[in-house]
Amino acid sequence: MSTTTRERFRPPDHPHDHFLLTTTVGSYPKPKWLDQLHDRREGERTAEDEPTPEWTESVTDATRLITAEHERCGLDVVGDGEVRRREMVEHFAHRTDGIEFHGPVKVWGHNCFCKPSVVDPIERSEPWLLEEFEVANEAAERPVKVPITGPYTLARFSFDEVYGDTKTLALEYAPLVAETVERLVDAGARYVQIDEPALSQVPDDHEIVGACLERIVRDVPDDVRVGLHVCYGDYSRLYPEVLEFPIDEFDVELLNGEYDQLEVFTEPEFTLDFAIGVVDNHDATVESVAEIKENIRQGLRVVPPERLTVSPDCGLKLLPRDVAAEKLENMVRAARELEAELDAGVVDVPDHG
Ligand SMILES: [Zn+2]
């Protein structure tokens, strides 16, 4: 299923026979003026269900700016950088009935977030991500990928006073995500990425994630590319179970651990498309093209080039924007150089059977 959904993203003017699909993971540094607007809105707590003309114009401008920046960097599949989202769980929780907020809590890594409390049965209070996609799709010339926080992470990062356990709550979130994907597909989306960062925190819950994914893809047409991104953690606890997930692509954060865990994915043989992070989202030093090529070649130890996708390790949102752009630019140059070398037959590609 995977390689058939990949070819549609090959740009018509792609210069090589080989095609290492280049894309973004999701979040991207916001324009400073938009950050300020987000802060102000948060203070007013008007919620985004009543968008002011200023908000609508600002996020549309920001979307045009970021998709154009991704296209200038040469990405084959672009994103809007999640300019409308302040936080990956809150964004969805604010658009869900049955949820209350009781102020910020401290979380790992980043500062604070307003952890949602489920106090009543959950229901979407408005469409998720539809406008975000439509505006991005309209702005971009290249195809747009939509990252969606997965049901398991939405459940794991909430207080729950209703459902009793993470699995039940996750399975309640799954149809909401499924309906979201369905609407996105109807609106023209052909590449969605489910983000489950919580899975690397409590990795023994892969069964819950698998069940949620089954629900999400149930009515998704075959020509839609479904990716799963799981942030850095102990991947050996979800492999090889991941291979049973109904996805086209598994996107991992391995550069973070200097590819120490790459071996995990070589036995048994990896059968999905493999999306490998090749630029560091934690380090503001821009990697050289040569260095990134080495990182991409790590991926060839897991899959042949026709199943390798190239992306940053994780969302780039904490970097200065010019640094993020330079990283993407070098990433694309590295992929294109390596494709040319693959075409020329001068790259040693390990045998994958
Ligand atoms: Zn991540």
Image (tube, rainbow, N blue to C red):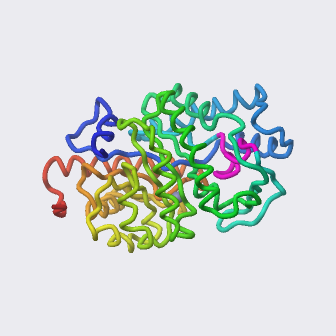
**Quadrant where the N terminus is found in the figure:** top left
Q: Give the range drawn in magenta.
A: 84-97
| Coordinates of residue 72 in the picture (x, y in percent) | 45, 36
| Coordinates of residue 336 in the picture (x, y in percent) | 29, 46
- In front: 214, or 343? 214
- Quarter assignment of residue 226: top left
Residue at horizontal 50 percent and vertical 58 percent from the top: 209
In this view, the residue farthest toward the left is 345
Q: In this view, does 127 lie to the left or right of 68?
A: right
- In front: 156, or 10? 156
**Quadrant where the C terminus is found in the figure:** bottom left
- In front: 92, or 169? 169
Q: In this view, does 67 lie to the left or right of 46?
A: left
Residue at horizontal 71 percent and vertical 44 percent from the top: 35
Residue at horizontal 64 percent and vertical 34 percent from the top: 127
| Coordinates of residue 45 in the picture (x, y in percent) | 84, 43
- In front: 118, or 2? 118
Q: How many labels does the image show?
A: 0
In this view, the residue farthest toward the right is 44
- Say if the magenta span includes residue 90: yes
| Coordinates of residue 160 in the picture (x, y in percent) | 73, 60
Does residue 125 sit above or below 164 in this rendering? Answer: above
Residue at horizontal 32 percent and vertical 72 percent from the top: 263
- Quarter assignment of residue 257: bottom left
- Say if the magenta span includes residue 160: no
